[in-house]
Image (cartoon, helix red, strand yellow):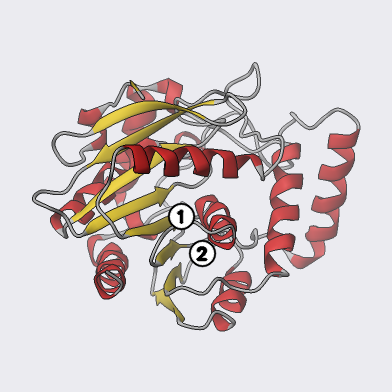
Amino acid sequence: MQTAPLFAELAQGPAGGQAFWLAAADGVRLRAALWRAGGAGRGTVLLFPGRTEYIEKYGPAAAEMATRGYATLTTDWRGQGLADRLLDDPLPGHVLDFADYQKDVAALVAAAEALDLPRPWHLMAHSMGGAIGLRALMNGLPVASAAFSAPMWGIAIPAWKRPFARAVSTLATALGRGAAYAPENGPVPYVQAAPFADNMLTGDAGMFAFQQQHLSAQPGLALAGPTMRWLKCALAECRALASLPSPALPAFATLGSHERIVDPAAIRSRIARWPGANLLEIAGGEHEVMMETPSRRAVFYDAATTLFDANR
């Protein structure tokens, strides 16, 4: 694993963070980062980010887990962060097939093994990372438990629009327009386009500014709206996951009461049929519970620590 850039001042993670280049099985270059905990450590968190996200955004999460005795290993998925972008235009969020993300998971797990990271390992996944993580668990991801933040087990599209979204994304892809932006999306990243007031990510002004600062300082981290092909693949993956039984390991999910990006009904349905899993609903919370106000994000980190400590 060759050394990769890590913008440590922007990340505000634990001291001593390291970044590496990884190669997926199909040759796509990925970036991974490791923040270790002090001492022997209680285990390792495999942190799966959401769509548009990148390593530095999770420096504070790694700091939270380091104080609790856990190392954190995370990645830039293909098509985002400093990983290889999949289109000539780097801004659209694009993927050829959702199964390709499992190649990225395999590369991250191989890195965790090569680094001999403290066990047990635990999954922590946000939004799109929750869909990737659920599929990885079904494929045998070697973790002892899983903590989900607003997992993308469905997309918050009004019921009357869902057939249209499925049809138009399928047709656009078939007609060679898969790289076009999905409806109601465009080339400006959300945190640069939206004001803090009534934003869909967080109720914490400081955490919203934290994300804006990243893209101002390092524009190469930016990702804008999803493409038609991403939408087609994401909708298909959510349908496929919904038809499968839950994996047999302890888990929980958090859901903000103001969630407007992923589908709350899909989360409630999955947790209701997942033995040993529970749902924590965060009053006043938006989509990014790990980047919410201090009291809200503490609910997530405290629950994750309790779960991980109980499954050592």
Give the residue type at disc 1: His
* Alpha carbons under labels 2 and 1: distance apart: 13 Å
- Mark 2 or 1 closer to N-term? 1
| Residue 274 or residue 171, whichever sits in front | 274
Place of residue 61 in the rendered image (x, y in percent of width and height, measured from the top left): 28, 51
> Would residue 52 be seen by someone viewing this image from the given angle?
no
Quadrant of the frame with the C terminus = bottom left
157 to the left or right of 8: right
Using the image, determine if residue 60 lies above or below residue 23: below
Residue drawn 36% across the image and 43% down it = 113
Mark 1 highlights which residue? 126
Of marks 2 and 1, the one in the foreground: 1
Give the residue type at disc 2: Glu
Query: Secondary structure under badge 1?
Result: strand
> Would residue 45 be seen by someone viewing this image from the given angle?
yes
Using the image, determine if residue 105 lies above or below residue 31: below
83 to the left or right of 135: left
| Residue 264 or residue 185, whichever sits in front | 264
Using the image, determine if residue 92 lies above or below residue 296: above
Query: Secondary structure under badge 2?
Result: loop
Tell me the quarter of the picture where residue 153 sits: bottom right
